[in-house]
Amino acid sequence: MDIETIKAQIDSEIQNINSTQNLEEFRLKYLGRKGILAQLTSQIPLLPQEERALFGQQVNALKNRILSLVSEKQKSITGGPIHRKADIYDISMPGIAQELGRLHPITQVIDEICTIFNRMGFSIVEGPDIETEFNNFTGLNIPLEHPSRDAFDTFYLKGKDKLLLRSHTSPVQIRVMKSRKPPLAIVVPGRVYRPDATDASHSFMFHQIEGFMVSENIRFSDLKGVLELVARAVFGKDIKMRFRPHFFPFTEPSAEVDISCIICKGKGCSVCGRKGWLEILGSGMIHPNVFKHVGYDPKKYTGFAFGMGIERIAMLKFGIDDIRLFFENDLRFLKQF
Ligand code: PHE
């Protein structure tokens, strides 16, 4: 077939095309990898030398003609250029904005409290969620008969070596003290696990921040001073604090710490159960037996430790009445923080 015949054929064929699909078939017939123009091009080397240039130009001109016919036809079929699927996309519409995420309220509170401790010279350390029974219990002077060691009070993993999901962040005390020498000032944020039935104030997983300071001559008054500073920074200057005697196997003496109710300012309301006080943490002076377990001389060193529940503090701070909201990933809730 000579070029003129093909040209005539093209001109008549294009007249009859009226769908995108036919147009694509037409395009492939001529411009496809095995199409008519490719065949013509492959003939060029077979031609006598003096004819090649002219023939090449003719093939090229033909190709350009087909391209412009196709693009015109495309416009007349769909009303747009060949790549614009006008019937599907409206390119003049505004795009979908990608929403920037934000930190979870629990993470925000952890960051805020850790930053306050950090400014006072505490380092931040993290430990694993899966712990040994020694670090979670034995090293912390928690006796074998203590109820929290019971299989129903702790999530044990299958296996002989009695690994478990830590029930508090205190095992990180053991980890740090075994690997470092005093003086130490450490805070430990992290998840802890207890097989509590879930309700508005309980969750089987929640967060704590553990803190401890060990050196020569650390006293209970240091604990009070540090905690009071933190409570004021988190809840405001007018907050009152009280230390209530309590028992923890790994501290002696031990105390629970309450702050004056931030809802009723101490007068008594439903949030504080008419007491006017809210418990926020457990604390005390590190028990000499704990020091013995990690190889510290209890005659030389003293220290304090405390552990606070983050959900509790976040609930008080933001006025949230159900702990489950933190874990449901409902954006309507999370977007408020
Ligand atoms: N580990 C204790 C708990 O989870 C809190 C605590 C930490 C108490 C450190 C005293 C000292 O209840």
Image (cartoon, grey):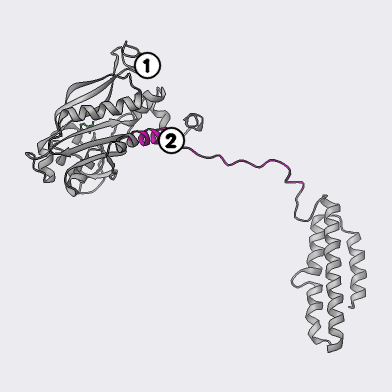
Q: Where 164 sits versus 147, above or below?
A: below
Q: Nearer the viewer, residue 102 or 1?
A: 102
Find out if the beta carbon at label 2 lies less than 8 Å from the nearest ligand 1 atom.
no
**In this picture, which residue range is highlighted in magenta?**
86-113
Q: From the viewer's perspective, is 42 left or right of 264?
A: right
Q: Where 289 sits versus 268, above or below?
A: below
Mark 2, secondary structure of its residue: loop
Q: Can the viewer see residue 133 in this picture?
A: no
Q: Nearer the viewer, residue 289 or 35?
A: 289
How crowded pointer 2 is (Cα within 10 Å; few <14, some 14-19, many 20+) is rated as: some
| Mark drawn on residue 294 | none
Residue 112 lies in the magenta-colored region = yes
For the point 28% across and 13% down, which residue is it?
Answer: 275
Q: Where 198 sits versus 100, above or below?
A: above
Q: In the rendered image, which quarter is residue 151 located in?
A: top left
Taking the view exactly as shown, the residue that stands out farthest to the left is: 299
Q: Nearer the viewer, residue 209 or 6?
A: 209
Find out if the beta carbon at label 1 lies less than 8 Å from the nearest ligand 1 atom.
no
Tag count: 2
Q: Where 312 sits versus 189, above or below?
A: above
Tell me residue 185's x, y (percent).
23, 39
Tell me residue 35's x, y (percent).
78, 71
Look at the magenta stretch and give its main secondary structure. Answer: loop
How crowded pointer 1 is (Cα within 10 Å; few <14, some 14-19, many 20+) is rated as: some
Tell me residue 28's x, y (percent).
78, 66
Question: For mark 2, what is the residue?
Answer: 104
Residue 12 lies in the magenta-colored region = no
- Quadrant for ligand 1 reads top left
Question: For mark 1, what is the residue?
Answer: 263
